[in-house]
Amino acid sequence: MINEIIKGISKLTSSSQDLTPDITLLKFTIVNACLVGDKNGWVLVDTGLENSSDFIVDASLRRFGKDNPPKAIILTHGHFDHVGSAIQLAELWDVPVYAHQLEIPYITGKRDYPLADPDADEGLVAKISPSFPHRAINLGYRAVTLPEDGSIPGMKGWRWIHTPGHTEGHVCFYRDPDRTLIAGDAFTTVKQESLLSVLSQNEHIKGPPAYFTTDWDTAGKSIGKIRELKPSLAIPSHGMPMQSEKLARHLDMLFLHFEGISVPEHSRSSNTFFNDSPPR
């Protein structure tokens, strides 16, 4: 019942926002996706929930016109709120779906994700998370591994960066000239474990959604990798974009205090990643 309510909220509150001349953020309240490119060529980054496809198609028609499908669908990872419309849209547009090689088993029906952890947080979303879909989808031949050289098909000037921890094959997308980062679930700017926080979109820098994160040590190291890039604009999959000095300060804080900010108490140990170096 709660899952149906969440899907309904997502559909009713769907909206879009142009962030740059070539990036449109698609906001489904529960999760974000992006249109990246222009009328000469574009891609869809992540696909939202299973009821997000109509809005995505309408948004792409408004932005790119009729008979102008994307070059590809690009995934940050394979969790249900990122691949919900992947099969339907890939078939509609007859396009490949790219993901890191470690995510391929989860989008080709070969391996399921672990069940979510309801004890990761006291928030309602965390508590109901074991009911979220965790089984693999099967894109078949449409699932393609991202190129080993770091390039991204259909996203000229961008490169993918392996940022595991939330999942084995989680990736972010980074454009060096303007230091724009599509962060996926590497970190969030909303407390994703709390339904009230998700609905209000109150700003709250945090690590990846705790109930689905499998390796906290690696997730912390991925924040360090992102911080070293010094992004000027970060577009997370959960929460609103963040930029400039505010983003730098928040990444410093998240990196230096990752365990206290992000890691569930029952997952903390003396081996959990942390760093005591001073902020930049």
Image (tube, helix red, strand yellow):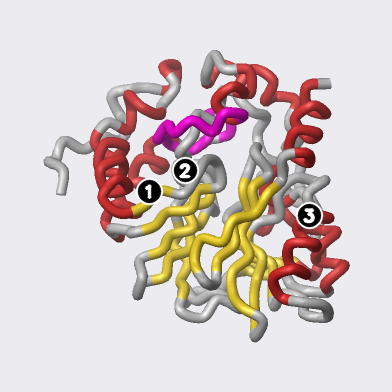
Direction from residue 136 to residue 218 in the image, left or right:
left
User: Could you tell me if residue 227 is visible in this image?
Assistant: yes
Residue at 32% of width from left, 33% of height from top?
258
Work out whether mark 2 precedes mark 3 in sequence or the reverse, and give the earlier one.
3
- Is 55 drawn above or below residue 30 in the view shown? below
Mark 2: secondary structure: loop
Q: Are marks 1 and 3 in contact (CB under 8 Å)?
A: no
- Residue 216, given in percent of the width and then of the height, sits at 42, 35
- Residue 106, given in percent of the width and then of the height, sits at 70, 51
Give neighbour class at mark 2: few <14, some 14-19, many 20+ (Cα, 10 Å): many
Which image quadrant is residue 74 in? Answer: bottom right
- Circle 1 is placed at which residue position? 222
User: Could you tell me if residue 103 is visible in this image?
Assistant: no
- Residue 80, given in percent of the width and then of the height, sits at 71, 43
- Circle 2 is placed at which residue position? 165
Q: Are marks 1 and 2 in contact (CB under 8 Å)?
A: yes
Mark 3: secondary structure: helix
Q: Are marks 2 and 3 in contact (CB under 8 Å)?
A: no
Q: Amino acid at mark 2?
A: Gly
- Circle 3 is placed at which residue position? 55
- Residue 15, given in percent of the width and then of the height, sits at 68, 49
Give neighbour class at mark 3: few <14, some 14-19, many 20+ (Cα, 10 Å): some
Q: From which residue to which does the magenta span run?
A: 199-212
